[in-house]
Amino acid sequence: MLARAPTAPVLKTRDIHNHHMDSTKWDTFKFRDDDIIIATYSKSGTTWMQQIVSQLIFDGAENIPVSKLSPWVDLRIMPPEVLAGVEQQTHRRFVKTHLPADALVFSPKAKYIYVGRDGRDMVWSMYNHYANANEHWYGALNNTPGRVGPAIEPPPPTAEEFFRQWFEQDGYPFWSYWENVRSWWALRGLPNVKFMHFNDMKRDLPGSIYEIAEFLGLPKQGKVFQDIVDHCTFAYMKAHAETVTPLGGALWEGGANTFIHKGTNGRWKDSLTKAEIAAYEQRAIKELGEECASWLANGGAAVK
């Protein structure tokens, strides 16, 4: 059984550095009390949640430049002027992180939304992201000064091989999935932390958006609410991919339409063996406990 929500303040206990991340960027982040932080393990619905939050903030307006307004704070190669621009924003701010909770500075007044997704679904999505990265992606991550640890290399030739590498080497060449989920699950009872699941958002997008709006204190009704729902569908985001994709998709072959790929689950079911599926499910319980493993696989309310 994992620990319940902490009763003491949540404190940063470590830093994480790799080809993607520099957690020290949070050390100088100047929080506002109404900030919104979207936290995920990569490819778990991050961009989707950024779109939902942007629509709630801007009352369903079209053509919101989400990728510019909502940067990945702990991305090592993020230009300083981007984060400086966040300090100049006059609207309610929303940014993202892929760090485990104990590696960032935690504000007791900001609102945190954690989006979960089954690791197998996430890996298939990540493989598309990784396999279609172009020379600019590799150049930025590997050649920008300040990288700690080895360079990132091209992926294996298939998603199945990538899954085996990722599973056997605890997230390699990215970062640990288990510690990310585990660290946020421990905070699920805090009043300023909201858990959402990719599956639930697919099953009931209007209901999920309503739930998020209530949590953020941004209730919407009537046509505005319907516009928000319409602008957060996969079809809409695919058609407007350049406004939500980092750098308009310039770091991937095929551009923004490659980044906003399929948004589907279950592609691993016909690719992994029964033994591999069982090993994953057993590992999830061992790493996370039965309640968290069940939530991560299926969605539903996160038990507090």
Image (cartoon, helix red, strand yellow):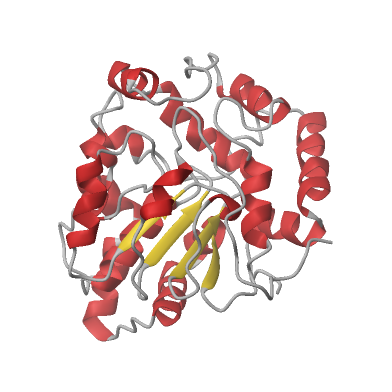
Residue at coordinates 61% horizontally, 58% vertically from top-left?
184
Q: Position of residue 279 (x, y in %)?
A: 81, 35
**Residue in front for this viewpoint, 265 or 188:** 188
The residue depicted at 33 percent of the width and 23 percent of the height is: 144
Q: Is residue 190 above or below residue 48?
A: below
Viewport quadrant of the N terminus: bottom right
**Rendering quarter of residue 185:** bottom right
User: Residue 139: in sight, yes or no?
Assistant: yes
Residue at position x 52%, y 47% from top? 99
In what quadrant of the picture does the C terminus appear?
Answer: bottom right
**Left or right: 31 as drawn, with respect to 119:** left
Q: Is residue 178 left or right of residue 220?
A: right
**193 and 156: which is toward the camera:** 193
Residue 106 at x, y percent in the picture: 50, 63
Q: Nearer the viewer, residue 102 or 296?
A: 102
199 vs 7: above or below = above
Residue 65 vertical placement versus 190 (above, below): above
* Residue 240 appearing in the image: no
Please tell me which residue is depicted at 49% across the width and 25% down the height of the picture.
Answer: 148
Residue 227's image quarter?
Answer: bottom left
The number of callouts visible is: 0
Residue 225: quadrant of the picture: bottom left
- Residue at the extreme front: 28
**Position of residue 147 measured from the top left corner of the image (x, y, whole percent):** 43, 25
